[in-house]
Structure formats: structure tokens, C-alpha cells
Amino acid sequence: MAMSDSAINPEATARIRALLASRAKTERMWPLLGAAFLAAASALAFATAMIVAPPVTSQHVVQSAP
């Protein structure tokens, strides 16, 4: 039996294969940009806290030993 004698319509088969074929996944940029913004904002917050915070001073408990 030749291919031209088949009862299956080749155009319909091609359409079905095209509909069932998996589409290429596109990468979304918003999650990446959100994570980068969160990292940059937290880095700026920590840097600001380091600049604004008063310096750590320590005093010795024993001022003089006998």
C-alpha cells in the first residue's frame, strides 16, 4: 500500500503534529530583575546601617590590677 493510498489526510496529520508539538519555553526576566533588585536594596540597607550606626566602643571591666 503506497502512502498516497492512505486514508489519513496528510494536511490534518501535519496540523495535529504542529498542535501537539511542545512550544519553546521563553525565559522570563521579571523574577531575575526582582531578585537583583532585592539583593541591591539589601546591600544598600546594610551599607547605610554600617555608616549610620555609632562605632562600637568597649570598656575594660578591670581598670587597674593590684
Image: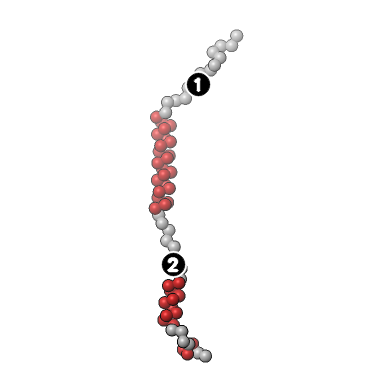
Task: Give the image's coloring scheme.
Answer: secondary structure
Residue 58, numbered label: 1
Tally of numbered tags:
2
Assign a secondary structure to mark 2. Answer: loop
Q: Residue at x 45, y 72 (%)?
A: 20
Instruction: Choose between 15 and 32: the one closer to the eye.
Output: 15
From mark 1 to mark 2, how far is it between C-alphas? 64 Å
Residue 23, numbered label: 2
**Location of residue 17 in the rendering, given as x and y in whole percent from the top left corner:** 45, 75
The amino acid type found where label 1 is placed reads Ser
Residue most toward the top? Answer: 66
**Location of residue 22 in the rendering, given as x and y in whole percent from the top left corner:** 46, 68
The quarter in which the C terminus is drawn is top right
**Location of residue 35 in the rendering, given as x and y in whole percent from the top left corner:** 43, 48
- Answer left or right for 26 relative to 61: left
- Answer left or right for 1 relative to 54: right
First-in-chain label (1 vs 2): 2
Within-10-Å neighbours for mark 2: few <14, some 14–19, many 20+: few
Task: Give above or below for 53 relative to 35.
Answer: above
The amino acid type found where label 2 is placed reads Arg
**Mark 1, mark 2: which one is toward the viewer?**
2
The quadrant holding residue 52 is top left
Task: Give above or below for 66 relative to 59.
Answer: above
**Location of residue 63 in the rendering, given as x and y in whole percent from the top left corner:** 54, 13
Task: Give above or below for 26 relative to 5.
Answer: above
Q: Residue at x 50, y 90 (%)?
A: 2
Assign a secondary structure to mark 1. Answer: loop
Instruction: Choose between 5 and 25: the one closer to the eye.
Output: 5
Q: Residue at x 43, y 78 (%)?
A: 14
Residue 36, numbered label: none
Instruction: Choose between 61 and 55: the one closer to the eye.
Output: 61
Residue most toward the front? Answer: 7
